[in-house]
């Protein structure tokens, strides 16, 4: 369970961690909503909007993800494994090399 900032999503993706994302509603330009939406569209996360603690949304999301595994579901339909695969698609594992390449190209232009 995490907020949906770029740093958090990057770490979740590189670790291929299934996630329930709760975007911070006061984030500038609602960028966490966009980040969470992009991750969910790739099948990498489930979005739960922020509500008071007594709201059932978070508990329901947790049960939808953990319930099948607790009931011994077929791994082919395990929601956690599907989210893990989505996070693997989201991950940029060579970001350091890509950044170094961009910086080298920029320095050649100066």
Image (spheres, helix red, strand yellow):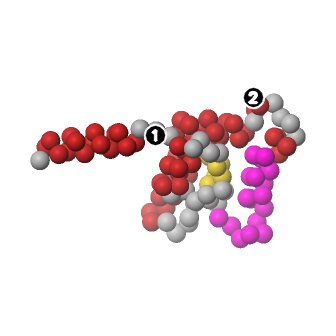
Tell which circle, 2 or 1, labels the residue nearer the N-terminal end: 2
Q: Nearer the viewer, residue 107 or 26?
A: 107
Task: Report helix, strand or loop for mark 1.
Answer: loop
Q: Which quadrant would residue 86 be assigned to in this image?
A: top right
Furthest toward the right, the residue is: 71
Q: Which residues are magenta?
A: 50-66
Answer whether residue 43 is visible to the viewer in this image.
Answer: no
Name the residue rendered at 71%, 41% in the picture.
80
Task: Report helix, strand or loop for mark 2.
Answer: helix
Q: Which residue is mark 1?
A: 92
Name the residue rendered at 46%, 39% in the picture.
93
Q: Nearer the viewer, residue 22 or 18?
A: 18
Q: Nearer the viewer, residue 107 or 31?
A: 107
Name the residue rendered at 30%, 43% in the picture.
100
Q: Magenta stretch containing residue 64, yes or no? A: yes
Q: Which residue is mark 2?
A: 76
**Where is residue 2 shown, x and y percent of the image?**
61, 57
């Amino acid at each position: 369970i995490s907020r949906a900032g770029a740093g958090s999503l990057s770490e979740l993706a590189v670790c291929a961690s299934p996630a329930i994302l709760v975007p911070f509603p006061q984030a500038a330009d609602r960028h966490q909503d966009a980040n969470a939406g992009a991750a969910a569209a790739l099948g990498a996360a489930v979005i739960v909007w922020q509500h008071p603690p007594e709201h059932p949304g978070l508990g329901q999301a947790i049960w939808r993800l953990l319930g099948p595994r607790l009931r011994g579901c077929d791994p082919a339909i395990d929601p956690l494994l599907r989210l893990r695969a989505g996070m693997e698609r989201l991950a940029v594992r060579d970001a350091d090399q890509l950044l170094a390449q961009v910086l080298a190209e920029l320095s050649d232009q100066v």
